[in-house]
Amino acid sequence: MKEGRVSILIRTKNEGRCIGQTLEAIFSQTYKDVEVLIIDSGSADNTLETARRYPVKIHEIKPEDFTWGYSLNYGFRRAEGEFVICLSAHALPLSVNWIETLIADFDDDRVAAVMCKAVPWPDCNPFDRRGLLRKFNIEKQEIKEGPPFLFGNTSCAVRKAAWEKVNYDESLSYCEDQDWLGKVRKLNYTAVYEPAAEVYHSHNETLKQIYKRHYQEAGALKKLGLRDHTFLDILIDSVAGSIYDMLYVLIKMDGPKWFFFAPLRRFTINYARFKSYRNRQVRAAT
């Protein structure tokens, strides 16, 4: 197994509800040669107060400077580790040997990144729960290009030497991780999905949050040439997808709340895509 300093890079903004639990899990790991960097973009809650209870390095950036790529590059430049773990503040490691498991795959010098298995939180909404269980219910394997399995920085480890050759694109509103992996592949690197390294990670987003995420994602995917839905695609997904989601809720007996939320969610997703495709430039926002 690889040994040496590991840097854990956590991007935060108003993560007070979960940052303490996540840091507690990190500092309970069996692997001890670790530094933790918090890159905060304007928290107005108790995120930083909680973080200061732990031996972490806190860096604050202006909210108006934020993009996913910018915050990552900012942290990587300051990271001392040979390997850098990118971790969402609300992604909770599920074992004390999580770090060891994650970096073991770097014994292969061709590996530029290792991605964790995301397990939905117990209170996860039925739609994200369905998607996560479907996506991550696979064996350990090399991560292939494009859907259905896409690389993500929510919980992954990156070989810093690979990042030094290819930085993250700071102009993208989303999908900086997929763009990065595509570029390092051209340098004969690869990436691995490691299901033994598990984290809790899921969202229960409001309609406003759903709109923002899909608006930014659609703009980035179009810019990268990875996906471009037509108006007909959007219309079909709004109608057929809503029916599918409502039937799924009925079958799983998840309750009337989610039954009535289902069509609102689908409409919001597709309206965000439609608006994003019509906009020439989409900027990230925290």
Image (tube, rainbow, N blue to C red):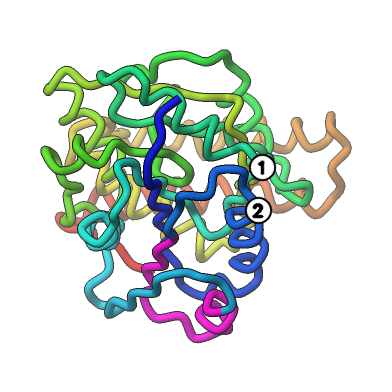
- In the image, what residue occupies the spot 11% across and 38% down? 165
The answer to whether residue 179 shows anywhere in this view is: yes
Splitting the image into 4 quarters, where does residue 11 fall?
A: bottom left
Q: Residues within 10 Å of mark 2 (few under 14, many from 20)?
A: few
The C terminus, quarter of image: bottom left
Which numbered dot is residue 96? 1
Splitting the image into 4 quarters, where does residue 235 fall?
A: top left
From the top left corner, tell me how far across and down residue 75 is, in percent.
29, 60
- The count of marks equals 2
From the top left corner, tell me how far across and down residue 271 is, in percent.
42, 52
The residues bearing labels 2 and 1 have C-alpha atoms spaced at a distance of: 6 Å
- In the image, what residue occupies the spot 53% across and 79% down? 52
Residue 161 is left or right of residue 233, and the answer is left
The N terminus, quarter of image: top left
- In the image, what residue occupies the spot 26% across and 48% down? 219
Residue identifier under label 2: 28
Q: Is residue 190 within the magenta segment? A: no
Amino acid type at mark 2: Ser
Q: Are discs 2 and 1 less than 8 Å apart at CB?
A: yes
